């Protein structure tokens, strides 16, 4: 393999890891507060469609990203309302959000664009001065899309906030023992709302990244289960942002290698192998999950609604 | 809060009413607490003590009534309000986050350490507070690493660190050893000498007489007595609390031990966390005797009981029943061999709450005649008539208070659920009865009834293995006692042979009998 090939495999690894990292760290925050949001996939699909629509109509990519965030925010509010205020079963509420996002994104796309082929001008990769000149690594990590640079900052910051800030302490306490937090005057409802809404907003952004940076088009089920992979990676990372981040890179790498192999097999005309390769990243994640699942210990209050007044 | 004179009323509630579906938990309750005193709030489970304190702490909203702090009417909408009024609460079930450190638990919810937490400053202030109040716990230890006594100190520090001047303790001694209890009482005396007010919730009469200045007794949501400690006597308090005369006596004659029923040799087992919880213990239980296990919860008792009942696999050792090896047999076979379990987790392990009382009573013997009758080879049918008859008989015999045998078992009170479990386990012809915390959380009446049942089971020739966190229960029921500490037997004796302080030392692991002596005891 040439250095250029290695560099481009790594470059694609980072690209594929980025939406997962946003969705994953968002889900991680929600779960740390005790809310299991299984609707990530649906929120990503809605974020993807909305950003596609805004980019297509205005041509402004910044607006497109923001539209993805906004729609995530709205769906996060819905999820928080159902699971925190109404205390519904979170698995049911999350699946509801998923089906809603899945159906609505496809419905709106087909209603607005019909069978017409619509595409947008994708975002460009930007080279960072100096850093991008480093051999192999420079081209892989520092000639990248805008959201990748955001990821480089966001994940460490969210890790730091989770373990070192007052809000992070409150978040962790609420997810482990909401009653204990409540008795010390921590607002359980507020924290769960904030974490869920923030998480969903990041899932919306992840959808926007998929559309605006990777595909440039929209189609039904464009996410290919990445939202569920993100939930799996939270388990893989044992609810730690940095470990989860490493998981997204693992998925990105296996995806990137699979794509290279696909190219190879399609060049030599073995089409059945091309489709087989698509499965690889999912199998890798599955195996990784099995490997760590024995050690994974979820936040104690995960998916348990909190009710202050119960007669004991 | 400014300085207050001793004797000044710092907290007062008037006419508090709180209703839950089906019950009035607090029925027009009035209460006054003064600076410099320990006020004992005495009552049985369900008397409404904890509800009242939860109202004062802002966890519940009262339906009626007023609260005054330092003579001023206040509205406490949540714990935050209570904390800022100088009220601190130590809950019976510690309100702590197991996965966080002591320091993190104590500063949780405080704003003064900034958005990015200044842990150095927090640690410094905490050390100062430890100094001032004479309590200490390692600030960097995780809660799950602490003993019950240490957890309680964390809980008290949480309140004091927030400047509590009125400290509420809900059943604080239920998890402590005798030594730790003594320590706690000393600490509380020091607090009130410093001008604080302490509300001490309990149902243990002895403790009230030991630590209280003033006593308020509650029964069924109402205050039924207010006394100074000097004018109170234990029988009088018991009568107020229960509403009738109470006999503090168990009808128990000499044991007539027979052949060995259960023999355990060198048994080892792991806990759920993967550390060794039972470390090679040996003992035996004979026909017609009660062997009791004393010890602080979490020293391997739970794992031991689970191994004996086939719920956990031992890693080494042997369990024999009448000389027959039953090591590692699954639970359904253990049940058939004639071992009964009265589990600690009454509602989740002891019954199926959504099944009727009758169905719960025949759970383990449903496949026997006359409850299931042969239609032809390979097909049997249930006889609801016989099940019903059997259930009615047990309900009468064991005094289970239930509207009917068809009532869902989950609707019964704790005491009646326990009677149901005992009725089932004692009536199916077992040889060995394992009773794990049989009276924990029950009121005086039910406790008395259940202890007498265990003694009766002994006298009718059963072997009884009793595990209890209540030392006085172990001492009054058992014929032989073993003390467990960190998975080992640290002492064996007959009740009356050792003073209570010494037993406490064994429970804390401060003292240990030689292994040979322990093993010889069971010969």
Image (cartoon, coloured by chain):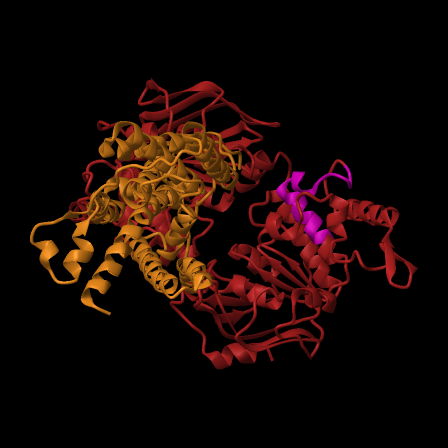
Chain colours: A orange, B red
Q: Which image quadrant is residue A254 in?
A: bottom left
Query: Residue B491: x, y in percent?
Result: 48, 70
Measured along the vertical axis of the image, is residue A31 above or below residue B139? above
**Which residue is drawn at the image coordinates 50% and 42% (left, top)?**
A91
Number of numbered discs overlaid on the protein picture: 0
Query: Residue B11: x, y in percent?
Result: 36, 26
What is the span of residues highlighted in magenta in the rendered image? B404-423
Quarter holding the N terminus of chain B is top left
Query: Residue A219: x, y in percent?
Result: 41, 40
Q: Is residue B53 visible?
A: no
Query: Which residue extends farthest right?
Result: B376
Query: Which residue extends farthest left?
Result: A130
Indicate yes or no whether the magenta region holds residue B407. yes
Q: Is residue B64 visible?
A: yes
Tell whether B223 sits left or right of A60. right
Measured along the vertical axis of the image, is residue B19 above or below residue B316? above
Tell whether B172 sits left or right of A212. right
**Which residue is drawn at the image coordinates 77% and 40% (left, top)?**
B406
Query: Residue B123: x, y in percent?
Result: 19, 49
Which is the main secondary structure of the residues drawn in magenta? Answer: helix
Q: Which of the two residues, B56 or A251, is positioned nearer the viewer here?
A: A251
**Which residue is drawn at the image coordinates 28% and 49% (left, top)?**
A18
Tell whether B357 sits left or right of B368. left
Q: Which of the two residues, B286 or B501, is positioned nearer the viewer here?
A: B286
Indicate yes or no whether the magenta region holds residue B92. no
Q: Which of the two residues, A191 or A207, is positioned nearer the viewer here?
A: A207
Quarter holding the C terminus of chain B is bottom right
């Amino acid at each position: 393999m040439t250095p250029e090939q290695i560099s481009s495999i790594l470059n694609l690894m980072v690209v594929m890891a980025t939406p997962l990292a946003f969705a994953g760290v968002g889900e991680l925050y929600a779960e740390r507060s005790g809310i299991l949001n299984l609707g990530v996939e649906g929120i990503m699909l809605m974020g993807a469609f909305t950003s596609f629509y805004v980019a297509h109509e205005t041509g402004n990519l910044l607006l497109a990203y923001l539209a993805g965030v906004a729609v995530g925010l709205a769906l996060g509010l819905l999820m928080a309302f159902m699971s925190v205020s109404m205390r519904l079963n979170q698995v049911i509420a999350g699946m509801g959000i998923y089906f809603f996002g899945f159906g609505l994104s496809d419905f709106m796309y087909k209603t607005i664009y019909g069978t017409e082929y619509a595409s947008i001008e994708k975002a460009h990769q930007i080279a960072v001065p100096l850093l991008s000149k480093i051999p192999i690594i420079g081209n892989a990590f520092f000639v990248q899309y805008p959201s990748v640079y955001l990821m480089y900052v966001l994940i460490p910051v969210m890790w730091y906030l989770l373990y070192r800030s007052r809000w992070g302490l409150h978040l962790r306490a609420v997810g482990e023992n909401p009653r204990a937090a409540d008795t010390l005057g921590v607002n359980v409802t507020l924290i769960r709302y904030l974490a869920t809404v923030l998480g969903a907003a990041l899932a919306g952004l992840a959808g926007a990244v998929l559309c605006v940076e990777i595909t440039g088009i929209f189609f039904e089920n464009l996410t290919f289960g990445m939202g569920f992979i993100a939930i799996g990676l939270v388990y893989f990372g044992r609810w730690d942002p940095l470990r989860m981040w490493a998981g997204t890179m693992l998925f990105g790498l296996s995806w990137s290698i699979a794509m290279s192999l696909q190219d190879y097999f399609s060049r030599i005309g073995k089409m059945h192998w091309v489709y087989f390769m698509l499965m690889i990243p999912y199998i890798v994640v599955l195996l990784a999950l099995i490997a760590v699942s024995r050690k994974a210990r979820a936040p104690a209050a995960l998916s348990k609604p909190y009710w202050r007044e119960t007669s004991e | 809060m400014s300085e207050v004179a001793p004797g000044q009323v710092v907290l007062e509630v008037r006419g508090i009413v709180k209703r839950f579906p089906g019950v009035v938990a607090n029925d027009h309750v009035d209460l006054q607490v003064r600076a410099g005193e320990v006020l004992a709030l005495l009552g049985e489970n369900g008397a409404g003590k904890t509800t009242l304190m939860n109202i004062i702490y802002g966890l519940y909203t009262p339906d009626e009534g007023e609260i005054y702090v330092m003579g001023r009417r206040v509205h406490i909408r949540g714990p935050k309000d209570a904390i800022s009024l100088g009220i601190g609460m130590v809950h019976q079930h510690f309100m702590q986050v197991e996965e966080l450190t002591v320091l993190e638990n104590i500063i949780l919810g405080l704003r003064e350490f900034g958005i990015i937490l200044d842990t150095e400053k927090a640690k410094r202030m905490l050390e100062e507070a430890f100094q001032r109040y004479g309590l200490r716990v390692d600030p960097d230890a995780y809660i799950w690493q602490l003993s019950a006594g240490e957890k309680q100190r964390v809980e008290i520090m949480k309140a004091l660190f927030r400047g509590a001047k009125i400290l509420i303790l809900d059943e604080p001694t239920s998890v402590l050893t005798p030594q730790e209890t003594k320590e706690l009482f000393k600490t509380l005396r020091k607090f009130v000498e410093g001008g604080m007010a302490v509300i001490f919730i309990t149902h243990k009469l002895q403790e009230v007489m030991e630590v209280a200045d003033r006593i308020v007794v509650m029964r069924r949501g109402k205050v039924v007595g207010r006394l100074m400690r000097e004018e109170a006597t234990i029988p009088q308090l018991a009568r107020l609390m229960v509403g009738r005369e109470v006999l503090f006596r168990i009808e128990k004659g000499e044991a007539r031990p027979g052949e060995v029923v259960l023999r355990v040799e060198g048994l080892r087992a792991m806990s759920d966390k993967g550390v060794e919880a039972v470390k090679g213990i040996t003992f035996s239980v004979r026909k017609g005797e009660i062997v009791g296990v004393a010890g602080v919860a979490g020293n391997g008792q739970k794992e031991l009981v689970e191994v004996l009942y086939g719920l956990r696999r031992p890693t080494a050792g042997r369990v024999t029943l009448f000389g027959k090896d039953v090591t590692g047999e699954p639970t359904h076979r253990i049940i058939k061999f004639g071992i009964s379990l009265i589990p600690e987790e009454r509602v989740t392990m002891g019954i199926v709450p959504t099944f009727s009382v009758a169905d719960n009573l025949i759970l383990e013997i449903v496949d026997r005649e006359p409850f299931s009758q042969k239609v032809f080879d390979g097909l049997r049918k249930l006889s609801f008539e016989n099940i019903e008859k059997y259930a009615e008989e047990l309900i009468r015999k064991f005094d289970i208070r239930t509207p009917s045998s068809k009532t869902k078992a989950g609707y019964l009170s704790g005491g009646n659920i326990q009677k149901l479990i005992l009725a089932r386990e004692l009536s199916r012809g077992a040889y060995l009865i394992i009773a794990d915390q049989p009276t924990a959380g029950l009121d005086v009446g039910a406790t008395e009834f259940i202890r007498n049942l265990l003694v009766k089971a002994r006298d009718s020739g059963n072997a009884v293995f009793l595990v209890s966190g209540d030392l006085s229960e172990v001492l009054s029921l058992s014929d032989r006692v073993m003390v467990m500490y960190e998975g080992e037997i640290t002492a064996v004796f007959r009740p009356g042979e050792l003073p209570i302080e010494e037993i406490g030392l064994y429970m804390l692991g401060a003292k240990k009998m030689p292994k040979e002596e322990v093993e010889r005891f069971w010969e």
